[in-house]
Amino acid sequence: MEFERLLALRLNVDIAQLCTIGCCTEGIFQSMDLLGIQPGDEVILPTISFIAAGNAIACRGALPVFCDVDSRTLNATAEDIKEKVTDKTRAIMLLHYGGLPCDVDEIMALAQEKNLYLIEDNACSPFSRYKSRCCGTCGDIGLWSFDSMKILVTGDGGLLYVKDTEKALHAKELVYLGLKQTSGYSSKVDNRWWEFDISCFGRRSIMNDISSAIGIEQLKKIDDFLRRRQYVHEYYMSQLADIDWLTLPPPFPDCVQSSYYLFWIQLRNEEKRDNLARFMREKGIYTTFRYYPLHRVPFFKQNVVLPKAEDAAHRTLCLPIHQSLSEKDMEHIVSVVKQFKQ
Ligand SMILES: *Cc1c(COP(=O)(O)O)cnc(C)c1O
């Protein structure tokens, strides 16, 4: 509760709209329940998304409709999404790639025009801002992850934001066994307080107290974490600027604030990208690509071509970025990139 209260203050929302949960994946699944996504419905999401987003939609019997993304930012634009809207579309599941907010105004206008729900997978962008709004609180539902790979970490954990307070109340029941009351001890009933009713067949997806306690401490340090990440980002931007065989992320618009979750560079083709990744790994530096395009995952049996996302997936590599990276680490990473003979 205290962690929720502090998060509500930080995100500038009502505590009634927030619900801490065991992990973000569970929240993404719950969002399908909350919005009543049915078999046969379509949900549009950028193909550059976390696997859980596709799973949650498909698991429901709905169709995940993967859309293309901008090849520099790896974010879906309103146009990319619009191309995929049909009369079966019910929702958009957005990702703010690497912490950089999408063009939220345009996407919200599209959602409004087509009468679609907007879900934000906010795992990359826990404290990003778009204009005056905190990412994750722009749409109908927002999901945060506090797993060990993220920015604010609690071992495992997540947060669910639900704009509509009535739905938010239902969310709190869904994540705790469907119970309509919190505990027998705190209830006002004078006898047989062990009797109860449920409002739905809920699961148990709440966050535990130990994780919440860690979260409270992490929240005190979050501004330092974000500053440090921004510093690493700017260091890479300046130190790698004169290398002509790689492309840096585009400058971020003034109206947004990133969480600097990922730092990505782009090479001329797949072979060069793969060679750089291997070269850096041999030198003890782990790089990766997030997120492998879901329309290419065979299990989804999708037969679409999304040229911009495919191009980006071939050429993009994520360099290490986190708040514990030392000055020496950063210098070493840059010098190894510069040693790469392509
Ligand atoms: C990590 C991640 C998730 C899932 O978070 P968990 O808390 O580990 O379930 C969802 N979406 C994105 C974009 C992520 O990076």
Image (tube, rainbow, N blue to C red):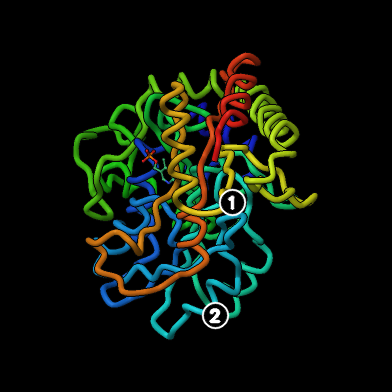
Q: Quadrant of residue 336?
A: top right
Q: Where residue 78 sits: x, y (%)?
A: 60, 70
Identity of the residue drawn at 60% across and 74% down: 79
Tag 1 residue:
137
* Label 1–label 2 contact, CB within 8 A: no
Identify the residue at image location x=54%, y=63%: 69
In the image, taking residue 26 as reference, residue 244 lies left or right, namely right
Q: Residue furthest front?
A: 341
> Residue tagged by mark 2?
114
Classed neighbour count for the residue bearing mark 2: other residues with Cα under 10 Å, few (<14), some (14–19), many (≥20)? some
Question: Is 233 situated above or below 26?
Answer: above
Disc 1 Cβ-to-ligand 1 distance below 8 Å: no
x%, y% of residue 319? 54, 34
Q: How many marks?
A: 2
Judge whether 182 appears above or below 327 on screen: below
Closer-to-camera residue (238/323): 238
Q: Amino acid at mark 2?
A: Lys
Q: Residue at x 31, y 71 (%)?
A: 63
Q: Which mark is residue 256?
A: none
Compare residues 206 and 278 and report the one nearer the observer: 278
- The percent position of residue 44, horizontal first and vertical second, equals 44, 69
287 with respect to 75 (left or right): left
Image quarter where the C terminus lies is top right
Q: Give the camera-side residue of 144 and 183.
A: 144
Above or below, 233 relative to 70? above
Give the quadrant of residue 19: top left
